[in-house]
């Protein structure tokens, strides 16, 4: 029927679980039989306070967050987080180390340079995803923190493990596109932050998981809405939050819990990405991944159609044919070109199998 779901491979804002959207729809006009929408309620109401508490608790439970870490919600998007990280942390020594592996970490480093000295750990590799030997990394023992982007959404590069950190400085990571897609040992991080709009909710909320001892040293110029210490003290209701977004995020987190938790998401994420990369590898070069195998993202899979540099007219045709089958948002980022399939938590293995089936048919048809 017309209301059945499209196959949405968009990079974000991205597909949300259907069950969650239905629940939201059912409650939209009257939350908890109140005769009011959650959108119409005070952020200091008992109803919203419970949502705020439950969302924090769900993140704690799902990621096994240790007691000495705080879970905060703020606004400003992932990009707001870039500035917030620097303004809250760089003051410790005035300098920070940035690992730049793609678009978003480059953007974060540029933003941070407005607030302190940014040291780029290694020069931009010639081939994306080619991270140089750790022995050549230029790490500063006095860095306030070591920053990296766990999953480069635009480029399709996932950091394979924790970065080399011989001086044991606090590690800050952007998990906008990888949060809740794999188990993480939170205790190894200083800060984990990101926008919710890919794996855990709609746009409008930024989650911040921060080790307690990193609070309390913001720059004087840090606006209060980006001040982690301030947000923590106000339990994330310092000013009016994006209440609707937090409400929906809380429901997505409960959905993750019901669907095997982070372990379940990780298992599914591996199955989906292995299936798609195999199809790319088995296409005799008709499809190709531009990223080194070790660094390929499980979450965002860029690929070219019709050869390693892509055939743009074939790629346009690919998108057109995909849309006829209601497969949407497969176009790669404008800076990268080609295709990109994003396989966030709400995208099922079945949907990926349908995509692969289409890819095979498209290849056969083109080559016949
Ligand atoms: N970081 C990553 C890894 C992203 O994928 C995005 C995506 O948009 C951002 C940061 C920027 O987030 P926002 O658009 O919410 O500012």
Image (cartoon, rainbow, N blue to C red):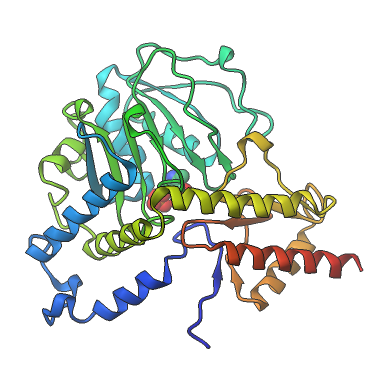
Looking at the image, which residue sits at the far right? 368
Residue at 76 percent of width and 59 percent of height = 312
Q: Position of residue 260 (x, y in %)?
A: 41, 55
Image-based side of 227 in relation to 299, left or right = left
Q: Which of 112 and 267 is in front in this view?
A: 267
Against 344, residue 1 (above or below) is: below
Q: Where is residue 339 in the image (x, y as percent from the top left)?
A: 66, 57
Screen quadrant of the C terminus? bottom right
Residue 76 visible from this viewpoint:
yes
Q: Where is residue 364 in the image (x, y as percent from the top left)?
A: 85, 67
Q: Which of 263 and 165 is in front in this view?
A: 263
Residue 333 visible from this viewpoint:
no
Image-based side of 311 in relation to 264, left or right = right
Residue at 44 percent of width and 13 percent of height = 166
Report the label total: 0
Q: Where is residue 50 in the image (x, y as percent from the top left)?
A: 14, 59
Against 338, residue 251 (above or below) is: below
Residue at 83 percent of width and 50 percent of height = 285
Against 51, residue 32 (above or below) is: below
Image-based side of 301 in relation to 260, left or right = right
Question: Which quadrant of the structure image shows residue 297?
Answer: top right
Against 181, residue 248 (above or below) is: below
């Amino acid at each position: 029927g017309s209301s059945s779901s499209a196959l949405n491979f968009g990079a974000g804002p991205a597909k949300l679980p259907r069950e969650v959207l239905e629940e939201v729809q059912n409650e939209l006009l009257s939350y908890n039989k109140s005769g009011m929408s959650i959108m119409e309620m005070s952020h200091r109401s008992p109803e919203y306070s419970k949502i705020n508490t439950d969302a924090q608790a769900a993140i704690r439970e799902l990621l096994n967050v240790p007691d000495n870490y705080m879970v905060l919600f703020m606004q400003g998007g992932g990009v707001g987080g870039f500035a917030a990280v620097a303004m809250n942390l760089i003051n410790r020594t005035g300098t920070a180390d940035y690992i730049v592996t793609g678009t978003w970490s480059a953007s974060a480093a540029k933003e941070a340079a407005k607030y302190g000295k940014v040291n780029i750990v290694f020069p931009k590799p010639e081939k994306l995803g080619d991270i140089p030997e750790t022995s050549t990394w230029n790490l500063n023992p006095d860095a306030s923190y070591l920053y990296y982007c766990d999953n480069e959404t635009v480029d399709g590069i996932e950091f394979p493990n924790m970065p080399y950190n011989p001086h044991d400085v606090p590690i800050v990571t952007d998990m906008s596109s990888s949060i809740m897609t794999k188990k993480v040992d939170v205790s190894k991080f200083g800060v984990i932050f990101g926008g919710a709009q890919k794996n855990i909710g709609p746009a409008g909320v930024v989650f911040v998981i921060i080790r307690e001892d990193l609070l309390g040293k913001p720059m004087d110029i840090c606006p209060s809405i980006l001040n982690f210490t301030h947000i923590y003290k106000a339990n994330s209701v310092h000013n009016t939050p994006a209440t609707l977004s937090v409400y929906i995020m809380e429901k997505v987190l409960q959905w993750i819990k019901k669907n095997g938790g982070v372990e379940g998401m990780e298992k599914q994420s591996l199955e989906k990405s292995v299936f798609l990369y195999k199809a790319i590898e088995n296409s005799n070069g008709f499809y190709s991944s531009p990223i080194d195998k070790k660094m390929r993202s499980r979450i965002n899979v860029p690929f070219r159609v019709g050869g390693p540099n892509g055939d743009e007219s074939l790629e346009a045709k690919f998108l057109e044919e995909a849309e006829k089958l209601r497969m949407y948002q497969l176009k790669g980022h404008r800076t990268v070109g080609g295709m990109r399939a994003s396989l966030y938590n709400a995208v099922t293995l079945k949907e990926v199998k349908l995509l692969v089936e289409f890819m095979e048919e498209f290849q056969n048809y083109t080559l016949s």
